[in-house]
Image: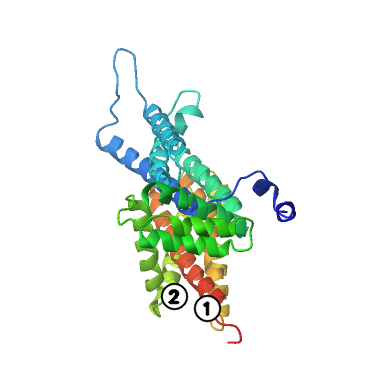
C-alpha cells in the first residue's frame, strides 16, 4: 500500500538517506570552527616562536592532534542516537580538521615547508570546496516531506529517552506538520505527543548562539540603514581587494600577475552586482538583496581566494566582512521567504 509514494521519491531517499533539516547549521559550525582553529593556531605558534613538541629526533606535529580530534568527533557521532551529540561532533570535528588542514603546506612540498607561501590560499580553497559541497547537498533542493518526518522521528528518539521540553515538542510538531501526507505521519505524530514532558534539555550552546545571532541579524536587517551599511561594507571590501590587485600588477607583491588581474576582474563583477542591486532594489528590495548576495559570493569564491594567494593571512579581514554580510543577507531573505509562505492568499 505504501510502495506507490516510495516509487516517486529520489534514489537517496529510497535508500533511507534522509537529509537533516539542521544539517546546514552543523556543517557551518564545523567550517567556522575549522577556520577559527587555523587562525588561532597560526597566531599562537607565531606568538610562541613556533615551538616543537617532542625531542630526541621526534616531533609531534599538530596534524596528529587534528586526527585525534576528528576521531573523537566520529566516536561521539557514532555512539549516541538522536540530535543531541551533533553540535558537539561538529565542534570536535572542526577543531580536528582545522589542526589537520593547517599543516597542508608540509604535505604538498618536497621539503615539508609549513611556511609555503600559497598555504593560506590552499586552505581557503579547501574551505570553499566544502562550502560548495554543502550548497550542493542542502541548498539546491527543498526538503521532501518524508525528510521532515524522518527528522521529527529523530527528535522523538531523544524525547523517548529524556522527555520533551515545551520548545522541543513544538519543534517536533512543526516537523510532523511538514511531513503530513507521508506514510507513517500519523504514527510519528502520536509518538511525539506520547513523549513525556521534561523541563531539562541537553545543553546546546552552539544552537543557542546561532539562534541569538540569527535573531540579531534579522532585527538589524529590518532597519532602514541596513541596506546602506551592507552596501558600504561590500564596496569597502571590494576597495581593499582592488588595492591588493593593483599592488600585484605593479610588482609590489611578488606573485604572478594573473592573480592581480583576476582580483580586478572579480572586484569589477562584485561592483557591477552592487550597482545592479541599487537599480532593481528601488522597486523590489528582495531583488536588490539577491544581487548584492551574488556580488558577495563572487568575492568569497574568487576575490578572497586570490587575495589570500597574494597577501596570505592579511586577507582575513575582507573574508570576515564578506561572511558577515552573507549571513545577514541569508537571514533577511529567509525571513522574507517565511513571510511569503505564511501570507494569507488573496492579499
- Write the residue at 50% across / 68% down: 334
Local crowd at mark 1 within 10 Å, few (<14), some, or many (≥20)?
Answer: few
- Label 1: which secondary element: helix
**Residue 252 in view, yes or no:** no
Tell me which corner region of the image, top left, top right, bottom left or bottom right, holds residue 343: bottom right
| Residue situated furthest top in the rendering | 56
The spot of residue 240 in percent (x, y) is 43, 59
| Residue situated furthest left in the rendering | 48
The spot of residue 38 in percent (x, y) is 38, 41
- Label 2: which secondary element: helix
**Residue 124 in view, yes or no:** yes
The spot of residue 184 in percent (x, y) is 60, 55
Relative vertical location of residue 282 with respect to residue 84 in this rendering, above or below? below
In terms of sequence position, does the residue under pointer 1 or pointer 2 come before the other?
A: 2
Residue 56 or residue 345, whichever sits in front? 345
Relative vertical location of residue 75 with respect to residue 249 in this rendering, above or below? above
55 left or right of 94 in image: left
The spot of residue 139 in percent (x, y) is 58, 57
Count of marks overlaid on the render: 2
- The nearer-to-camera label among 1 and 2 is 1
The answer to whether the residue labelled 1 contacts the one labelled 2, judged by CB atoms less than 8 Å apart, is yes
Quarter of the image that includes the N terminus: bottom right
152 left or right of 59 in image: right
The residue beneath circle 2 is 227
Local crowd at mark 2 within 10 Å, few (<14), some, or many (≥20)?
Answer: some
Quarter of the image that includes the C terminus: bottom right
Q: Tell me how far mark 1 sits from mark 2, CA to CA.
A: 9 Å
Residue 245 or residue 194, whichever sits in front? 194
Q: Which mark is residue 329?
A: none
Relative vertical location of residue 119 with respect to residue 128 in this rendering, above or below? above
Residue 156 or residue 298, whichever sits in front? 156
The residue beneath circle 1 is 285
Amino acid at each position: 500500500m505504501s510502495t506507490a509514494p516510495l516509487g516517486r521519491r529520489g534514489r537517496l531517499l529510497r535508500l533511507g538517506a534522509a537529509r537533516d533539516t539542521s544539517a546546514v547549521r552543523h556543517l557551518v559550525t564545523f567550517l567556522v570552527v575549522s577556520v577559527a582553529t587555523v587562525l588561532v593556531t597560526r597566531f599562537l605558534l607565531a606568538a610562541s616562536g613556533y615551538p616543537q613538541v617532542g625531542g630526541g629526533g621526534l616531533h609531534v606535529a599538530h596534524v596528529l592532534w587534528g586526527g585525534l580530534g576528528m576521531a573523537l568527533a566520529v566516536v561521539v557521532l557514532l555512539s549516541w542516537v538522536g540530535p543531541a551529540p551533533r553540535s558537539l561532533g561538529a565542534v570536535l570535528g572542526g577543531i580536528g580538521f582545522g589542526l589537520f588542514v593547517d599543516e597542508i603546506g608540509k604535505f604538498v612540498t618536497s621539503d615539508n615547508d609549513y611556511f609555503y607561501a600559497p598555504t593560506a590560499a590552499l586552505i581557503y580553497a579547501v574551505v570553499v570546496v566544502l562550502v560548495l559541497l554543502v550548497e550542493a547537498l542542502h541548498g539546491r533542493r527543498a526538503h521532501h516531506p518524508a525528510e521532515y518526518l524522518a527528522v521529527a522521528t529523530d527528535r522523538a528518539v531523544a524525547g523517548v529517552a529524556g522527555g520533551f521540553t515545551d520548545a522541543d515538542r513544538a519543534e517536533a510538531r512543526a516537523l510532523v506538520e511538514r511531513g503530513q501526507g507521508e506514510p507513517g505521519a500519523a504514527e510519528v505524530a502520536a509518538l511525539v505527543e506520547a513523549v513525556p514532558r521534561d523541563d531539562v534539555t541537553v545543553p546546546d550552546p552552539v544552537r543557542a548562539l546561532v539562534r541569538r545571532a540569527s535573531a540579531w541579524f534579522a532585527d538589524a536587517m529590518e532597519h532602514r540603514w541596513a541596506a546602506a551599511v551592507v552596501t558600504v561594507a561590500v564596496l569597502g571590501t571590494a576597495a581593499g581587494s582592488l588595492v591588493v590587485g593593483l599592488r600585484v600588477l605593479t610588482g609590489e607583491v611578488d606573485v604572478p600577475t594573473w592573480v592581480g588581474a583576476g582580483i580586478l576582474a572579480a572586484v569589477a563583477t562584485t561592483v557591477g552586482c552592487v550597482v545592479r542591486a541599487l537599480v532593481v532594489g528601488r522597486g523590489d528590495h528582495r531583488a536588490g538583496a539577491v544581487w548584492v548576495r551574488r556580488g558577495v559570493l563572487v568575492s568569497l569564491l574568487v576575490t578572497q581566494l586570490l587575495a589570500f594567494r597574494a597577501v596570505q593571512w592579511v586577507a582575513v579581514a575582507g573574508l570576515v566582512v564578506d561572511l558577515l554580510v552573507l549571513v545577514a543577507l541569508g537571514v533577511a531573505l529567509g525571513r522574507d521567504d517565511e513571510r511569503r509562505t505564511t501570507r494569507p492568499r488573496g492579499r
